[in-house]
């Protein structure tokens, strides 16, 4: 990289600002895997979608994925919660009018029915929440999301970080 005496830093022949403006953008989201002592997973029923989801949501501009997950838990469930470790990084191709993206899944640990009773659902966003087995998710959730839940559960069991593409484990 060179710097001109009169202008901005230059990479090759493009000013850095122009180079950065031309870089691709990806959407990001962050979810949290909560489970109970029977390995059922916590799912939420959004009021604005036709399928159930993992607790979490979109990462906003200038926000870290882990901060987004914590913010979403507070907004959706009324929980001020510290996340566990990263479990899954999932690359998703463009679909349903959404651009490609990267989804992060963090460990929320094991919850009890008492923890669920202390939830304060934001009814503008979430209709209901509860524990389900992965098998019970069929019909409530897109296959890609079921695959992501499965990958996250495997990551917990293995003590690993799992890389996925379209919810399917690749490493």
Image: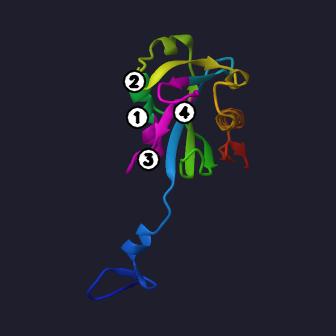
- Image location (x, y in percent) of residue 103: 56, 44
Q: Are marks 1 and 3 in contact (CB under 8 Å)?
A: no
Q: Nearer the viewer, mark 2 or mark 1?
A: 2
Q: Are marks 2 and 1 in contact (CB under 8 Å)?
A: no
Which residue sits at x=32%, y=87%?
4
The one of 124 and 60 positioned closer to us in this rendering: 124
Residue 148 appears left or right of 102: right
First in residue order: circle 1 vs circle 3? 3
- Image location (x, y in percent) of residue 151: 69, 37
Colour scheme of the picture: rainbow
The residue tagged 2 is: 124
Numbered circle sitting on residue 71: 1
First in residue order: circle 1 vs circle 4? 4
The residue tagged 3 is: 64
Q: Are marks 4 and 3 in contact (CB under 8 Å)?
A: no
Q: Are marks 1 and 4 in contact (CB under 8 Å)?
A: no
Specify whether residue 60 is painted magenta.
Answer: yes
The residue tagged 4 is: 32
Specify whether residue 149 is painted magenta.
Answer: no
Q: Which residues are magenta?
A: 44-69
Which structural element holds mark 4? strand
Which structural element holds mark 3? loop
């Amino acid at each position: 990289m060179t710097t001109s005496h009169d202008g901005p830093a230059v990479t090759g022949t493009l000013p850095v600002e122009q180079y950065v403006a031309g870089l691709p953008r990806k959407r990001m989201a962050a979810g949290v895997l909560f489970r109970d002592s029977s390995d059922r997973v916590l799912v939420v029923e959004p009021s604005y979608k036709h399928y159930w989801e993992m607790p979490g949501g979109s990462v906003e501009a200038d926000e870290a994925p882990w901060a987004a997950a914590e913010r979403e838990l507070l907004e959706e469930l009324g929980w001020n919660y510290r996340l566990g470790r990263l479990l899954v990084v999932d690359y998703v191709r463009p679909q349903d009018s959404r651009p490609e993206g990267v989804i992060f899944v963090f460990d929320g640990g094991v919850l009890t029915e008492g923890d669920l009773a202390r939830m304060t659902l934001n009814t503008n966003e979430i209709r209901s929440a509860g524990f389900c087995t992965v098998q019970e998710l069929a019909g409530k959730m897109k296959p890609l999301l079921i695959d992501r839940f499965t990958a996250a559960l495997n990551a917990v069991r293995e003590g690993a970080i799992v890389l996925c593409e379209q919810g399917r484990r690749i490493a």
